[in-house]
Amino acid sequence: MSARPTVDSLRSAIERAACDVSTVSNRGTYVRVYVAAPRSPEAFRELLDVLLTADAWGSSDGTGTLRMWAALVVRGEA
């Protein structure tokens, strides 16, 4: 994924890498895609490669489960 991904392509790539279903959250100026962090180092590395194509990425464990997220800025909308 060398070009800037779309939300749909980012979500698909995240789900393939993590082998899990993701959640999409529209925050107005950006869209975030969340997924549970994979346990295997290989899958985690693959997911990290995908996350690095987004405008921003990070993690949260506020639910008791480590979740990774990637965000894309929504162009042309305020």
Image (cartoon, rainbow, N blue to C red):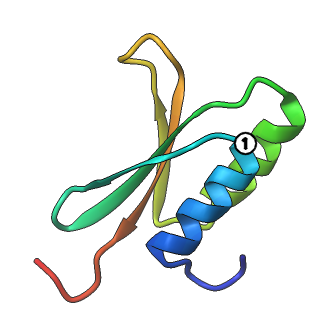
| Residue found at x 55% / y 77% | 5
Residue 31 % position (x, y): 32, 62
Residue type marked 1 = Cys
Query: Which quadrant would the C terminus be assigned to in this image?
Result: bottom left
Residue 52 % position (x, y): 63, 59
Residue 61 % position (x, y): 44, 19
Residue 12 sits in quarter: bottom right
Residue found farthest to the top: 64
Residue found farthest to the right: 42
Residue 19 % position (x, y): 72, 42
Task: Return the residue nearer the eye: 60 or 22.
Answer: 22
Callout 1 secondary element: loop
Task: Identify the residue under disc 1.
Answer: 19
| Residue found at x 49% / y 78% | 6
Name above or below for residue 14 compared with residue 65.
Answer: below
Residue 26 sits in quarter: bottom left
Residue 10 sits in quarter: bottom right
